[in-house]
Amino acid sequence: MKLSRVFATLCVGLVSTVSSVSFAQSGPSIEPQRPSEPSGALDVVPTSPSVSPETVAARRSPEVFELNPVSRFWAVRATAELGVLSVVSHTIQLSQTGSTIDYVREGGQNNLALFARVSAEVELGRHHNFVFLYQPIDLRTQVRVARDLLINNVLFARGTGLDLRYGFDFYRLSYMYDFFADPNQELSVGATFQLRNAAISFTSTDGVNRVLNSNVGLVPALKARGRYTFRSGVFMGFEVDGIYANIPGLNGSDIPVEGAILDGSIRAGLRLWGPTEVFVNLRYLGGGSRGVGRDVMAPGDGYVNNWFHTMAISIGANVR
């Protein structure tokens, strides 16, 4: 009997202990919380009527790196291209009594050459675009001349080995006004200022005869650019810089020399992750000049008649 009482007393004590511990851990009762508002109500991205829903949806996602937020007043972009260039037609005459040389047929420019260019861009207020571009062109060839060539009154006899260089690097600063604020559409017009850095040379392989013609000049031109991006991320566009002038100032000189430049391209590409894009580009690049320059390279008379026509195909990438 006593044993049963002891056992009952132990059970009651154990139950009391467990109950007190459970109450201490749970603490005072807490009111059930109200259901939280849907998270989408706080996930708001500022938009404007000119920004497409696809752009807003992409920029709302935390997984997409955003280089140029919609709310920012300015934006930056960069482009690089790499491909091949083919000289379609190229002739030059130095001095009025000089020979007209066909660079493609007899000057070794019948092979493909490396094509590359880079550009950087700043956009202000959705409409104002400033672009800086660098375009190297450096064609070096070696031939054995099949006829007598008179270049700047220097004679290169038939059979002479000849090293030729045609360098025409240029730097270009452009301003354009974009009529659309939507980043998926563009129609821009403006002006370009191109600084050419020409270096032309003909050197016999024995080093006896050499003709050099080099100059730096600023050429103004007109510019236009357009682009449309589909919902899928595929885009198409065009770009053109060009001018024709035969009056001082517009031709990049203070003398009446005829001059022209034309740089036109069409492209198609695809938007990848975040701000990156890839594209394929087809480009015509050409121009030339005819007349007597200000800097006369002795023993010539300063006359130059040089016309250059090329086609290039390249692949490129944008960061925008």
Image (cartoon, rainbow, N blue to C red):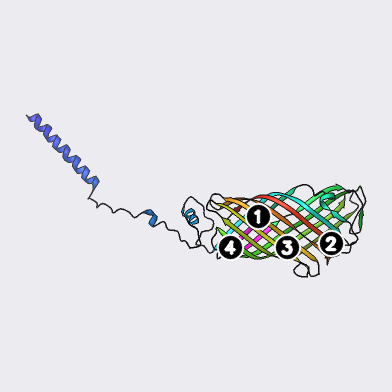
Q: Counting residues from the N terminus, which is met first, the one under dot 1 or under dot 2?
A: 1
Give the foreground label among 1 and 4. Answer: 1
Give the foreground label among 1 and 2. Answer: 1
Q: CA distance from mark 1 to mark 4?
A: 22 Å
Labelled disc at residue 123: 4
- Asked if residue 123 is among those painted magenta in the image, a careful observer would answer yes
Residue identified by numbered label 2: 304
Q: Which residues are magenta?
A: 118-133
Q: Position of residue 311 (x, y in %)?
A: 73, 52
Please report the residue visible at 56 percent of the width from the left and 59 percent of the height from the top: 185
Q: Counting residues from the N terminus, which is met first, the one under dot 2 or under dot 4?
A: 4
Residue identified by numbered label 1: 266
Q: Position of residue 187 (x, y in %)?
A: 60, 62
User: As rendered, which of 60 and 67 lies closer to the eye?
Assistant: 60
Q: Counting residues from the N terminus, which is met first, the one under dot 3 or under dot 1?
A: 3
What's the amino acid at mark 1? Answer: Ile
Residue identified by numbered label 3: 195
What's the amino acid at mark 4? Answer: Glu
| Image quarter of the N terminus | top left
Q: Residues within 10 Å of mark 1 (few under 14, many from 20)?
A: some
- Asked if residue 297 is among those painted magenta in the image, a careful observer would answer no
SS type, badge 3: strand
